[in-house]
Amino acid sequence: MYETVNKCSDIIRSKDESQSYLPVKLTAVTCIGAIYEKLGRMAGGTFQETVQTLIKAMKNAESQGRCEIMLCLERVLHGLGSNGTMIHRDIYKAVRGALTDRSMSVRCAAGKVYYTSSSNVACNSKC
């Protein structure tokens, strides 16, 4: 599992911006989201580095990539639950910028991340 997450992170970090490489990057983002959603706490050791990689990749991504990254961050937060509180600030900063994106799909995905993030915080304050 760690090898898969590291391989996907390497794909996301790659400098190849060609149109033919875009589906590979989107697949890597989706795979990371699925892994953390299902195995969240078990894959918990690498989540900070992975989230930083995703947030950095958002700055250069096209709208489809930004949307997928937002959905991936939502899955990471959902999978980690209360263990994800260390990265809430970084994710919130990325979401705040994405809420004003020109693409509606990115704004919707950012809203989903914000909702997931706020529900985790509300759960933590009640517990």
Image: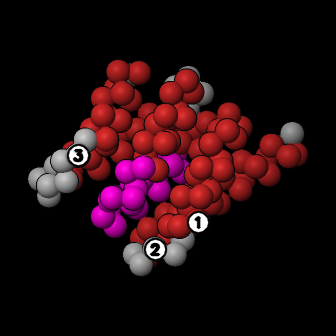
Q: In the rendered image, which residue does mark 3 sit on?
A: 15
Q: 10 Å neighbourhood of mark 2: few (<14), some, or many (≥20)?
A: some
Q: CA distance from mark 1 to mark 2?
A: 9 Å
Judge whether 26 appears above or below 127 on screen: below
Q: In the rendered image, which residue does mark 2 sit on?
A: 101
Task: Please report the bounds of the magenta region as a residue range.
Answer: 56-75
Q: Which amino acid type is shown beneath numbered disc 2?
A: Asp
Q: From the viewer's perspective, is 121 left or right of 112?
A: right
User: Of marks 3 and 1, which one's residue comes earlier in the chain?
Assistant: 3
Q: Identify the residue at image location x=50%, y=67%.
A: 98
Closer to the camera: disc 3 or disc 1?
Answer: 3
Q: Identify the residue at image location x=46%, y=50%.
A: 55
> Residue 112 sits in which quadrant?
bottom right
Q: CA distance from mark 3 to mark 1?
A: 25 Å
Q: CA distance from mark 2 to mark 3?
A: 23 Å
Question: Quick one: quadrant of the N terminus?
Answer: top left
Percent coordinates x, y for residue 40 in the rendering: 55, 32
Which residue occupies the foreground of this view, 54 or 36? 54
Q: In the rendered image, which residue does mark 1 sit on?
A: 96
Question: Quick one: quadrant of the C terminus?
Answer: top right
Judge whether 121 appears above or below 79 on screen: below
Q: From the viewer's perspective, is 12 left or right of 88?
A: left
Q: Identify the residue at image location x=23%, y=46%.
A: 15
Percent coordinates x, y for residue 62 in the rendering: 30, 64
User: Of marks 1 and 2, which one's residue comes earlier in the chain?
Assistant: 1
Is residue 43 rendered magenta in the image? no
Q: Are marks 3 and 1 in contact (CB under 8 Å)?
A: no
Work out whether residue 50 can be spotted.
yes
Asked which secondary structure carries label 3, the reply is loop
Percent coordinates x, y for residue 37 in the rendering: 51, 38
